Amino acid sequence: MFFKNNSATIDVLIKNSIEQVHFPYMPYCTYISEEEKVDFYNALPTDRDKEKIEVLVNNSTDLIRRMKIEYQFKKFFINYPLIGVFVYHTE
């Protein structure tokens, strides 16, 4: 069950055959908002595969960076919950 909940697959064309490649989620992969997911997917062109891959590669670096930062913040606020209270309730 752990592997099923913490991994994903991607279909890859290898020697004219579609193969499924399994890979684990990195811990920071769950720290992405629905809004960021939607924005990321909406930025992908749907008509040309080569252009889609270029956009994925170019935009994924920034998205991964933001997820890592959010992950570090969450870890920090778990260790220092009082600071987290002030940060999240200062509107």
Image (cartoon, rainbow, N blue to C red):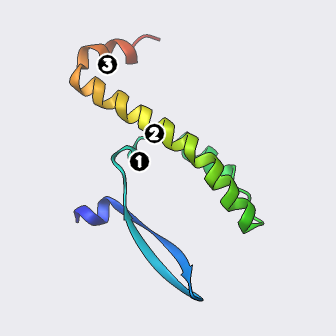
Query: Residue 12 placed where, x, y %?
Result: 53, 76
Is 26 on the left-hand or right-hand side of 82?
Answer: right
Report the Cα–Cα distance between label 2 and label 3: 18 Å
**Disc 2 marks which amino acid?**
Met
- Name the secondary structure under disc 3: helix
**Disc 3 marks which amino acid?**
Gly
Query: Residue 14 placed where, x, y %?
Result: 54, 83
Residue receiving disc 3: 84
Q: Are marks 1 and 2 in contact (CB under 8 Å)?
A: yes
- Name the secondary structure under disc 1: helix
Report the Cα–Cα distance between label 1 and label 3: 21 Å
Report the Cα–Cα distance between label 1 and label 2: 6 Å
Residue toward you, 71 or 1: 71
Residue 67 is marked as 2
Residue 81 to residue 65: above or below: above
Closer to the N terminus: mark 2 or mark 3?
Answer: 2
**Disc 1 marks which amino acid?**
Cys
Residue receiving disc 1: 29
Label 1 Cα neighbours within 10 Å, binned few <14 / some 14-19 / many ≥20: some
Label 3 Cα neighbours within 10 Å, binned few <14 / some 14-19 / many ≥20: some
Query: Residue 48 placed where, x, y %?
Result: 77, 66
